[in-house]
Image (cartoon, rainbow, N blue to C red):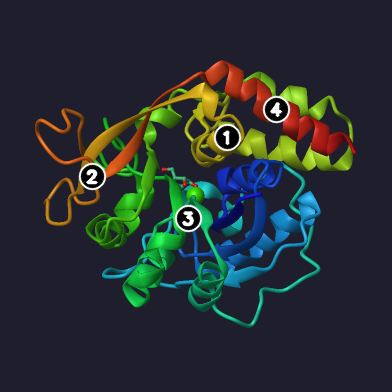
């Protein structure tokens, strides 16, 4: 069975990604945290709480508290208290703590032990540090399936998606090193929409865990439309869903560059699809998703987990 590592900056959608990934056929060997949605302390606490919620006994390691070359760009103002806003019930307090070993050393050790698929749902700082320190281990990275970037428009800025805006240099390091990247950008995640009825569907399950999840789904649906809520793209879980149901996605080769210098476009991912004519392929890009089917399956897993 292939081994899986999750690297995340846990807010609500990372939490759902963890809940899905642990139900895949992969063996989850470790989770690392990174500054992104919120501070490293918060993303680590949220990740430990996610493990508690899903009953996961997996080591959690603290990673980078700062991006590679700029100040942290956290957005807890948008995402609610601690980066994990809720309409009511909070996540359970974690019983466990993060491991003493840091995420960079832990991920290096995991790669020394054998091939690993990495699901990355935050800024790519930890992965860039690992590759910078130990380029010889690249061969043991089977694939980096990451949520970030966009082949169309951004969300944090008109041009850039949040994760690649928060640490564009790290994506650049991975591209230069030839890391095996598969990007799930906004062009893809906007095809997988969580709807208002999903909050009710979850609430109907009737357990404590269902209420916790429904309250977090409800908060997420009201990030933009505070009063009545509106359908929202389910970002990180879309990348996780690929690990479970790859047949529901179409993936294409691309030549990708990330903008490091643009005045208005820093963090933008520029995807040349006319490969190999206009550029050598250096990454894979998720282009289409069967969004409704994916949402059905995501809710099936979440409601099943919450019903126990
Ligand atoms: C990405 O940014 C974060 O806010 C989400 O967790 C997701 O990883 C979406 O742009
Ligand atoms: Ca994230």
Q: Nearer the viewer, mark 2 or mark 3?
A: 2
Q: Secondary structure at mark 4?
A: helix
Q: Earlier in the sequence, mark 4 or mark 3?
A: 3
- First in residue order: circle 3 vs circle 1: 3
What residue lies at 51% left-to-right and 42% top-to-bottom?
236
Dot in front, 1 or 2: 1
Q: Residues within 10 Å of mark 4 (few under 14, many from 20)?
A: some
Query: Mark 3, mark 1: which one is toward the viewer?
Result: 1
Of labels 4 and 1, earlier in sequence is 1
Q: Which mark is residue 201?
A: none
Residue 241's label in the rendered image is 1
State which tag comes first along the sequence, 4 or 2. 2
Report the Cα–Cα distance between label 1 and label 2: 24 Å
- Residue holding disc 2: 268
Number of residues whose C-alpha sits closer than 10 Å to that of mark 2, classed few (under 14), some (14–19) or many (20 or more): many
User: What secondary structure is found at the residue carrying circle 3?
Assistant: loop
**203 and 244: which one is in front?**
244
Name the residue carrying label 3: 37
Determine the CA span between mark 3 and mark 1.
21 Å
**Alpha carbon of mark 2 to alpha carbon of mark 3: how far?**
18 Å
Q: Position of residue 106 (x, y in %)?
A: 56, 74
Question: What residue do we see at 62% from left, 38% from top?
Answer: 219
Is 198 above or below relative to 284?
above
Across and down, in percent, residue 275 comes to 17, 32
- Which quarter of the rendered picture does the C terminus lie within? top right
Q: Nearer the viewer, mark 4 or mark 1?
A: 1
Q: Which residue is mark 4?
A: 299
Q: CA separation, marks 4 and 3?
A: 24 Å
Confirm or reject: label 1 Cβ below 8 Å from ligand 1.
no
Circle 1 — which element? Answer: helix
Asked if labels 2 and 1 touch by Cβ distance under 8 angstroms, the answer is: no
User: Would residue 230 be visible to someone looking at this image?
Assistant: no
């Amino acid at each position: 069975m292939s081994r899986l590592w999750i690297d995340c900056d846990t807010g609500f959608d990372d939490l759902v990604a963890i809940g899905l990934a642990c139900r895949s056929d992969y063996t989850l060997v470790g989770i690392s945290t990174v500054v992104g949605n919120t501070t490293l302390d918060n993303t680590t606490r949220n990740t430990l709480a996610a493990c508690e919620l899903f009953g996961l006994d997996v080591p959690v390691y603290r990673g980078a508290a700062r991006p590679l070359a700029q100040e942290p760009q956290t957005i807890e103002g948008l995402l609610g208290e601690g980066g994990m806003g809720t309409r009511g019930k909070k996540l359970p307090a974690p019983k466990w703590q993060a491991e003493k070993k840091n995420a960079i050393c832990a991920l290096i050790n995991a790669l020394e032990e054998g091939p690993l698929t990495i699901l990355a749902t935050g800024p790519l700082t930890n992965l860039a540090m690992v590759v910078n320190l130990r380029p010889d281990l690249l061969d043991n990275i089977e694939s980096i399936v990451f949520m970030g970037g966009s082949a169309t428009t951004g969300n944090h800025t008109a041009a850039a998606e949040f994760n690649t805006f928060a640490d564009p240099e790290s994506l650049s390091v991975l591209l230069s090193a030839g890391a095996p990247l598969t990007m799930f950008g906004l062009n893809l995640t906007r095809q997988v929409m969580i709807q208002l009825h999903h909050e009710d569907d979850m609430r109907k399950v009737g357990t404590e865990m269902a209420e916790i999840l429904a309250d977090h789904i409800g908060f997420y649906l009201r990030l933009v439309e505070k009063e009545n809520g509106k359908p929202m793209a389910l970002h990180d879980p879309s990348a996780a869903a690929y690990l479970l149901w790859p047949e529901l996605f179409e993936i294409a080769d691309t030549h990708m560059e990330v903008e490091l210098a643009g005045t208005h476009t820093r963090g933008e991912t520029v995807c040349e699809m006319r490969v190999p004519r206009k550029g050598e392929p250096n990454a894979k890009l998720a282009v289409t998703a069967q969004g409704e089917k994916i949402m059905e399956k995501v809710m099936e897993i979440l409601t099943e987990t919450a019903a126990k």
